[in-house]
Image (tube, rainbow, N blue to C red):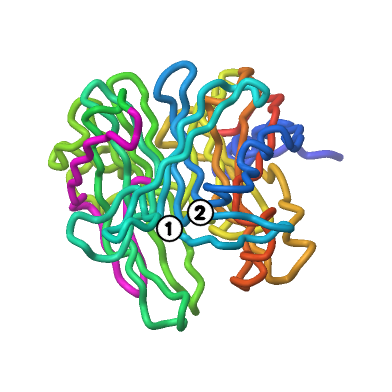
Amino acid sequence: MLIKRPIPKAICLFFLLLVAGCVAQPAVRVEVLPGFDALFDNQKGWTGADGAYSLPLSENVTLWLFGDTWLGDTQNGAHVNATIVNNTVALQHGKPPSEVSLNFYFGRTSIDKPGAFIWPADGRGWFWIYHGVLTRQGLYLFLVQIERTEEPPGSGFEIIGTWLGHVVNPEDPPDHWQIDRHRIPWGNFSSSANTFFGSWVLKQGPWLYVYGTTEDVVAGFHHKYMILARVAENRLSEFDQWRFYVKGNWSSDFNEAERLCGGMANEYSVSFLPSLGKFIVVYSENGSSRNIAARFTSHPWGPWSGPVDLYQCPEMSTDEDILCYAAKGHPELSAAPDELKITYVANSTDFYKMAGNTRLYRPRFIRVRFKGAGSR
């Protein structure tokens, strides 16, 4: 005889929570975009860079922000008569590749050699330009300050600070910009781990959500986590007005900033996908990986879903020295509510392989289309 017994409430609650966590992930369809790749396949001048953040300056003008950049000539698929500078920018007019024009901008050194577009005000090291935002107060750029270290020989570097660049005349061509630099006080920088903000800026209503990264280093591996600050759009440069997300509240202490999700990178993007009604973060898994991953949420602060694999970068299967990183979305270039254009960079740990292959070390484009409901 079957005896029916009531299921204990604790077991009921467990299964309810289990089912609640199994919300359907969106289906994705990916295609490569050789027409967009070709926009950055130059034979002279600007011939490659990493970073590749972008942001809209108007409906038809996109600003590109790059880290270390090749300037010079190419010949037979290799860089020749070339130099590397630490950052450059570009203005893109138009959106479809057939209609796009690109103008690249860099600086000059004291001896009139090609140089970085922007340098640290304190003269230490150099800047890599991260994300930025255009406001009524001007254009703001997040600048990560880097300095070379002894280890490993010839290629070691470390983050020593972050700055907020304020372009007071963004309507002028970049070579005429007036840029004020303000050191951001929120951050910790050491050989063991870094905490900083500027990985992405998301504008929502009156607020700017400034995303960042914190990390633990275990046995030489950097475990990176998303953190988040919020500030009114018209008060971005007033650092005492920043507040940091922790367990549903906004704290004035950046050291309390909650770790929102792991497996992250220093560079990533956060944008809203209209077709899903969700926010999406796009990143290279663990900072450097063949996997480009995404997470979804209903609110800028989460809770974020588990990771969803979007794409495997094919370059890493061709050479053990190649690494892929810097994946991020470009919502201002995305033409439909169900799509996101994404870039990543393939590089080589062998400098001479990178210098000898111009297909490396420049933005590679894919388009991802989403269908279905993103999980919370």
Residue denoted by label 2? 71
Task: Let me know if residue 113 appears in the view.
Answer: yes
Point out the frontmost of discs 1 and 2. 2
**Is residue 182 inside the magenta stretch?**
yes
Label 1 residue SS: strand
Q: In the image, which disc is placed on residue 188?
A: none
Residue denoted by label 1? 85
Q: Position of residue 47 (x, y in %)?
A: 57, 50
Residue range of the region highlighted in magenta in the rendering: 173-198
Q: Position of residue 203 (x, y in %)?
A: 36, 26
- Label 1–label 2 contact, CB within 8 A: yes
Q: Is residue 47 above or below residue 18?
A: below
Residue at point 64%, 63% (across, down):
323
At label 1, the amino acid type is Val
Q: CA distance from mark 1 to mark 2?
A: 7 Å
Residue at point 70%, 25% (across, down):
372
**Is residue 185 inside the magenta stretch?**
yes
Please identify the residue farthest to the right as the structure is shown: 1
Label 2 residue SS: strand
Which one is nearer the viewer's eye here, 362 or 344?
362
